[in-house]
Amino acid sequence: MEGADLAQRRIVVAANRGPVSFHDDPSGEPVVARGPGGLVTVLTEVLRHHPGTWVAAALSDAERRLAAEQRAVEVALDGEEYRVRYVAPSPEAYHKYYNIVANPMLWFIQHYLWDLGRHPDIGANELDAWYNGYLVVNELFAKAVADEVGRHAGAALVLLHDYQLYCVARDVRDACPGTFLQQFVHIPWPQSDYWRVLPTPIREAVFRGLLGNDIVAFHTRHYVSNFLRCCADLLDLEVDETRGVVRHDGREVWARAYPVSIDPASLRDAADSARAHDAERELRSRRREFLLLRVDRLDLSKNIIRGFHALDRFLELHPEFKERLTFLALLQPSREDVEEYVTYRERVERIVADVNTHHGTTDWMPIDLRIQDDFPITLAAYAQYDVLLVNAISDGMNLVAKEGPILNRHDGVLVLSEYAGAYEELGAFALGVNPFDIEGQAEALHRALTMPADERADRAGMLRRVVEENSVEKWVQAQFSDIAAKLAADA
Ligand code: F6P
């Protein structure tokens, strides 16, 4: 259980993106909006239980002005109160950190996306991005976090998030001895051989940086196990896989799994909005007999193209479904300054045109592609789908697989990649697919669309139940109870 000591601790959260975003409106007045991404929802839940400061990178002029104040600002939005402190790297340093090292380099390694016969090249440009981008931005984060911890080192709890900040923990530990540090890695942790892509000094900096924490957290047991094996294989460290412990620098670092979830009640509230209702009316008026859905950031790891190939194949094998279904693909634009993402978007648009030309008729197109960021439409589509396709190549968790079943009213079938983190919890009630196997995915679409009604209802009910039972609140509690246990073990 959470100890009294823990409740008193000063909490500092750090993540690349903040919980809110400040922008100047056309008259130059700063306006504030909720920050994008699922991380905001789950970290807001953490801060609701344990108020603290959130350190984030300044991404707009308004945020850079706030960063110059070198202190946290307080902001209230949608009934939540946030204390946010911005760090402001130069645009060049941020570009190197975000667009070259974090995405694509680390993201591609951690999602097995590099085609190693051809990519990546780690040349002068990449090394420069590491030393003059990633490390520089990480140092800025470490300084701001240490400043927020201030003189409370022995009574502070620092919660670092994700792959953009692997080299922060050690600096904070050096600057503020006695501070408790936990880092959550929200993306997959691949096996040790794939990490060998990185030159040894960079790889060691990543691992030793992370091992500056007291606890390193992941979404699944599989990633924990990969991480522990990596520590043994790549750094020759002493690892106890049964206890989930790595010995490093005379300390014990724990590796733990906490599968992140969603808050069903607030998702239902959002789906009850006028805009979501309007969007659902519109969807209903246009829907064919069956609605297939995918909802993703436009990211290579999501495996969007193979999903369209699978639909193509399914329609070839089962032409009786022509004109009876629509595959709605809601894709949010992402990382548009990274070349690989630009090319990927073009390929996605091309395959959609090909499949639509191949099977479409004068008044029907199988794929309805919408590259946009529109949450009310997503909520409406969740309510209406018959099949939800989540066929990621690799995915830390995938919250779409949890959000969909909560809102769906059609006993929709979840077709779920075996390589999405969510598969550990939901796989038994979904139709599992190998993301590379297009025939298998085509077959799963057919099975989903022809499944007897009672089986659909049973599976949909079980998916809802698992998600309801593993709420985001439980996710927070599990972490705080391990933090208390680790503090007690180290005392
Ligand atoms: O899954 C990791 C993550 O950082 C999420 O927190 C976020 O939703 C997503 O990737 C988007 O990344 P970006 O901040 O680059 O848009």
Image (cartoon, rainbow, N blue to C red):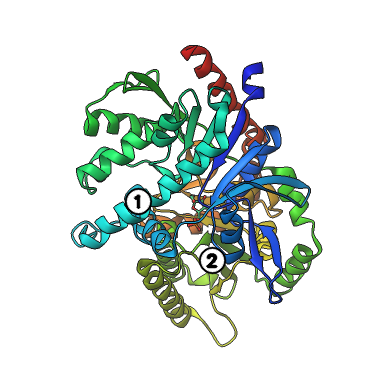
Residue nearer the viewer, 73 or 14 = 73
- Of label 1 and label 2, which has the lower sequence position? 1
The correct choice, above or below, for 228 with respect to 69 in the image is: above
Residue 106: mark? 1
Q: What residue type is disc 2 on?
A: Leu
Q: How far separated are the C-alphas under marks 1 and 2?
A: 22 Å
Number of residues whose C-alpha sits closer than 10 Å to that of mark 1, classed few (under 14), some (14–19) or many (20 or more):
some
Q: Is residue 172 visible?
A: yes
What residue do we see at 42% from left, 67% from top? 317
Residue nearer the viewer, 247 or 167 = 167
Q: Quadrant of the N terminus?
A: top right
Residue 486 spot, x, y in % from top left: 50, 18
User: In the displayed structure, does residue 331 sit left or right of residue 262?
Assistant: left
Residue nearer the viewer, 103 or 241 = 103
Q: Nearer the viewer, mark 1 or mark 2?
A: 1
The correct choice, above or below, for 361 with respect to 450 in the image is: below
Number of residues whose C-alpha sits closer than 10 Å to that of mark 2, classed few (under 14), some (14–19) or many (20 or more):
many
What residue do we see at 50% from left, 11% from top? 491
What residue do we see at 53% from left, 26% from top? 153
The quadrant holding residue 282 is bottom right
The quadrant holding residue 156 is top right
The quadrant holding residue 214 is top left
Residue 13: mark? none
Residue 331: mark? 2
